Every structure is written in C-alpha cells, then in structure tokens.
Image (cartoon, rainbow, N blue to C red):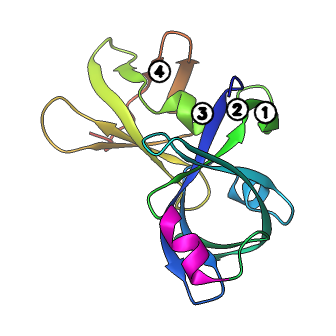
C-alpha cells in the first residue's frame, strides 16, 4: 500500500451482538469520518491487516463512537478487530480555512512564552465548549492548560513545531 493513511480512531471494544464497534476518536472531524457511507480502513501493522470498510451508521456515546460497518452483522465478525486502528487516505482530509490546523499538527509542538520561556510540549487537545484547550506537558510540575484564543496564542509554526503564547494572568 503506497498511499499515506491518517489515523482517525481506534477500535476498543464491541457493542451488542449485531456487529457494532466502540471507537475512541482521534480525529478533528468525527461527524465527517464516521458519517454514513464513509470509507475507512481497519489497520493492524503487526498482523499485516489492511481492510477497507464502509460506515453504515454511527452515534456518539459516552465520549466514544458506536459504529456499525456495512460489512459485518455479528459480534463474532468484529471482535477480532479490537485494538486495530481506523484510518483514512490522506486525500480524504477535510480542507481547512486559513489559521486552522489539524490536531495532529498541533500535538507535539513546543510552546514558548512571548518572554522566551520554554513552557513545554502540547500533549493533548480538549474541546470542552466555546474554544479548544491545549494541554501542555511541562518539564516540571503539573500540566498547563492554554485556551486556544487570540489573546493567548500569538503564533503557530507547524513546520518548526513551535507555538508562541502570551501567558495571561492566572494561567500559570
């Protein structure tokens, strides 16, 4: 397989007896990725598994997605895919507007303050409400939570994996 694939989720368990699977989403756009008739690949590099599947239906449930694939109607058919990744081809990426970024481009970026202080590396992105919150793993101490707002995030350079921020009072 020569095309580049992007991970959009991980199969963590089955749901019910009709072949549904529970998925932890790793995508910025789960409503697109798990929409009816979406094409996905079930991938397990260790088992050299690369299987094309189609979403029949999906729903969000307790921070997971319950997905029914058209190809399977029985729990016994999907149980073997626990632990496998769900991927899409790179050409299926959702097009972004200017100043929008994929989570995978932000996670792993170094964060520095406008005063030049090294703050840490972004390890996770939370979406609790009005704006995303970036979780920064600090070299020492507890994680730093940075709201993704214009007053805080000053510059994003995904090529250099570097983000410059202004620390508003109360953030540290």
Q: Position of residue 88 (x, y in %)?
A: 71, 42
Q: Quadrant of residue 162?
A: top left
The magenta stretch spans residue 61: no
Q: Are marks 1 and 2 in contact (CB under 8 Å)?
A: yes
At 42% from the left edge and 44% from the top edge, which residue is drawn?
A: 124
Where does label 4 land, which residue?
Answer: 163
Q: Are marks 3 and 1 in contact (CB under 8 Å)?
A: no
Tell me the distance, in whole angstroms, between the alpha carbons under discs 4 and 1. 19 Å
At 36% from the left edge and 20% from the top edge, which residue is drawn?
A: 113
Residue 98 is at least partly visible in this image: yes
Tell me the distance, in whole angstroms, between the alpha carbons under discs 1 and 2. 6 Å
Label 4 element class: strand
Q: Position of residue 41 (x, y in %)?
A: 68, 48
N-terminal label among 2 and 4: 2
- Side of 44 relative to 96 (left or right): left
Tell me the distance, in whole angstroms, between the alpha carbons under discs 2 and 4. 14 Å
Q: Which residues are magenta?
A: 74-81
Within 10 Å of the Cα at label 1, are there few (<14), some (14-19), or many (20+) other Cα atoms?
A: few
Within 10 Å of the Cα at label 2, are there few (<14), some (14-19), or many (20+) other Cα atoms?
A: few
Label 1 element class: loop
N-terminal label among 3 and 1: 1
Q: Which mark is residue 24?
A: none
Where does label 1 land, which residue?
Answer: 96
- Residue at the far left in the pictured view: 140
Q: Position of residue 35 (x, y in %)?
A: 80, 63
Tell me the distance, in whole angstroms, between the alpha carbons under discs 3 and 2. 12 Å
Label 3 element class: loop
Where does label 3 land, which residue?
Answer: 150
At 38% from the left edge and 21% from the top edge, which residue is drawn?
A: 110
Q: Nearer the viewer, mark 4 or mark 3?
A: 4
């Amino acid at each position: 397989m020569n095309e580049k694939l992007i991970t959009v989720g991980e199969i963590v368990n089955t749901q019910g007896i009709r072949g549904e699977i529970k998925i932890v989403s790793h995508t910025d756009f789960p409503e697109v990725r798990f929409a009816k008739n979406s094409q996905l690949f079930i991938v397990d590099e260790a088992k050299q598994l690369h299987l094309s599947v189609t979403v029949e239906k999906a729903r969000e449930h307790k921070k997971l997605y319950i997905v029914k694939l058209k190809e399977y109607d029985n729990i016994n058919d999907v149980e073997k895919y626990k632990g496998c990744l769900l991927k899409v081809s790179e050409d299926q990426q959702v097009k972004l507007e200017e100043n929008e970024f994929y989570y995978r481009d932000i996670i792993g970026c170094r964060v520095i303050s406008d005063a030049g202080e090294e703050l840490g590396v972004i390890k996770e992105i939370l979406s609790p409400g009005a704006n995303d919150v970036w979780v920064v793993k600090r070299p020492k101490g507890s994680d730093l939570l940075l709201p993704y707002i214009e007053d805080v995030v000053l510059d994003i350079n995904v090529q250099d994996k570097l983000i410059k921020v202004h620390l508003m009072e109360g953030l540290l």
